[in-house]
Amino acid sequence: MKEKTSNQKRHFSSLLVHAAFPLLVFAFVLGLPQQGEARLGESFSQCVKRYGEPIGTIEIPGLITNGVRFHRGEFSITCGFESNRCGTIVVMHLSPSDPKQQPLSRDDIDLFLNDNFGHTSWRYTLLSSRENKWKTYDLEVPRLYVASYSHVLKMLTMSIEQG
């Protein structure tokens, strides 16, 4: 009799695990950070959906016009807008708890490149020992995209090539 009760408990435990597994997966997926749809060329509202409410504005002549700053996790993200479309994104590793800017890791750079322009892969070009540069062309929406990382400034810049 004791063996039968033990087998029933094991069977019940097994059923419980199988029934709970989809709920655990669902809870895990809900707990993941939600990605918006903002990409280079997307609207201000899509950037807000992805990065959250802006924390300020910024103008950097020759680099960013109509810049809006966001903060997400350990990153400061500035989007430059023209005609309500994001034409430039600048990313820095800057934590609110530590005012000293950190360099971006290659994994972080790859994540932002893939996250902000996912239709095709980036082609890497080494311009100098101080700067890395990538280019790609979107066949879906014919445009040239460029990105560069400055080790000196510790800054990743991604933009739609004009012209």
Image (cartoon, rainbow, N blue to C red):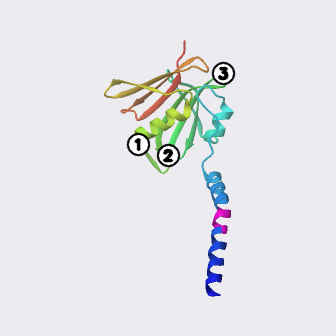
| Residue under numbered circle 2 | 74
Circles 2 and 1: CB distance less than 8 Å?
yes
- In this image, 74 relative to 67: left or right? left
From the viewer's side, name the closer residue of 134 and 79: 134
Taking the view exactly as shown, the residue that stands out farthest to the bottom is: 1
Tell me the kind of residue under disc 3. Ser
Could you tell me which residue is drawn at 41 percent across and 38 percent down?
106
* Among the 4 quarters of the image, the one containing residue 124: top left
The residues colored magenta run 15-20
Could you tell me which residue is drawn at 62 percent across and 33 percent down?
38
Distance of label 1 from label 3 (alpha carbons): 32 Å
Quarter the C terminus occupies:
top right
In the rendered image, the vertical position of residue 17 relative to residue 126, given as above or below: below
Quarter the N terminus occupies:
bottom right
The label on residue 102 is 1
User: What secondary structure is marked by label 2?
Assistant: loop
Mark 3 packing: few (<14 Cα in 10 Å), some, or many (20+)?
few
Magenta span dominant secondary structure: helix
| Residue under numbered circle 3 | 83
Distance of label 3 from label 2 (alpha carbons): 29 Å
